[in-house]
Image (cartoon, rainbow, N blue to C red):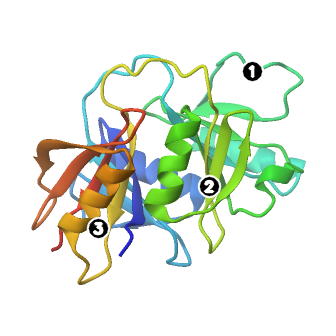
Amino acid sequence: MTSQLFAICFRATRPSDLARFWSGVLGWEVAGGPDEDAAAILPPDGSGFRIRFLPGQEPKTGQNRAHFDLTSASPEDQRRTVARALEHGGRHIDVGQRPEEGHVVLADPDGNEFCVIEPGNKFLADTGFIGALACDGTREVGYFWSEALRWPLVWDQDEETAIQSPDGGTKITWGGPPVAPKTGTNRLSFELALPVGADHQAEVARLVSLGATRSEAEEGDGEGGRVLMFDPDGNEFFVQRPR
């Protein structure tokens, strides 16, 4: 059985604070108790991935390899989203965007970049509020994740790729070359989970056959922990062990 995208994980200096920020921006519910070491927010309809916030003290060096693109239904809606983000502790940043570009570039309280896209973006028209997780990556890694998640390619042109769940929702995109060298541990990563009764070892082997590599390291995350793996571009991701 194929892994499912269980969560997009942020490494955060203060996980619970960052969870509150993104809960306020997205309108997602905070899950779990008052534990400062980890937190999560859940989508309102209960479908798709959750967002998890895990402890990490890695210094930020340059732009993240992945960021959220949030959609807007109208200019007023875009302004409301920006205002809500600023109210909860976000800030405007300059990453080289041109004045004539319609999207607004912001950073969350931990410095993670995200964009609020102008209305009328056709590429994100069939998504939700989180229109895309936009990643810096090769065409090869887009093909890898399409096979790993069994999500079809919805864009494959000029070495840029994008995938989307058969159920719709957020797209995951990779911008193609040039891809900046990876420095240190990524702040954003994928966490995969298997359906109950699936063969965990067989799934790890399948991912390796597609081009992933496995680390000997393992993170404790409740009973069973998580297996650390790397995709073809060297990005960390995790596969939950059966609990």
First-in-chain label (3 vs 2): 3
Whole-angstrom CA distance, mark 3 to mark 2, is: 30 Å
**Secondary-structure class at tag 2:** strand
Residue 112 on image: x %, y %: 49, 33
Q: Determine which quarter of the picture holds residue 217.
A: top left
Residue 66 on image: x %, y %: 52, 37
What's the residue type where badge 3 is placed? Answer: Gly
What's the residue type where badge 1 is placed? Answer: Gln
Instruction: Give the residue drawn at x 55%, y 31%.
Output: 136
First-in-chain label (3 vs 1): 3
Camera-side residue: 164 or 129? Answer: 164
The extreme bottom residue here reads: 197
The answer to whether the residues at label 3 and label 2 have Cβ atoms under 8 Å apart is no
Mark 3 or 2, which is nearer the eye? 2
**Secondary-structure class at tag 1:** loop
Residue 75 on image: x %, y %: 88, 47
Camera-side residue: 182 or 19? Answer: 182
Q: In the rendered view of the protein, which quadrant contains the N terminus?
A: bottom left
| Numbered tag placed on residue 119 in the rendering | none
Q: Is residue 51 above or below residue 177?
A: below
Whole-angstrom CA distance, mark 2 to mark 1, is: 25 Å
Instruction: Give the residue drawn at x 64%, y 65%.
Output: 169
| Numbered tag placed on residue 163 in the rendering | 2
Query: Can residue 173 be seen in this snapshot?
Result: yes
What's the residue type where badge 2 is placed? Answer: Ile
Say which residue label 1 marks: 97
Say which residue label 3 marks: 32
Mark 2 or 1, which is nearer the eye? 2
Q: In the rendered view of the protein, which quadrant contains the C terminus?
A: bottom left
First-in-chain label (2 vs 1): 1
Mark 1 Cα shell of 10 Å, populated few (<14), some (14-19), many (≥20): few
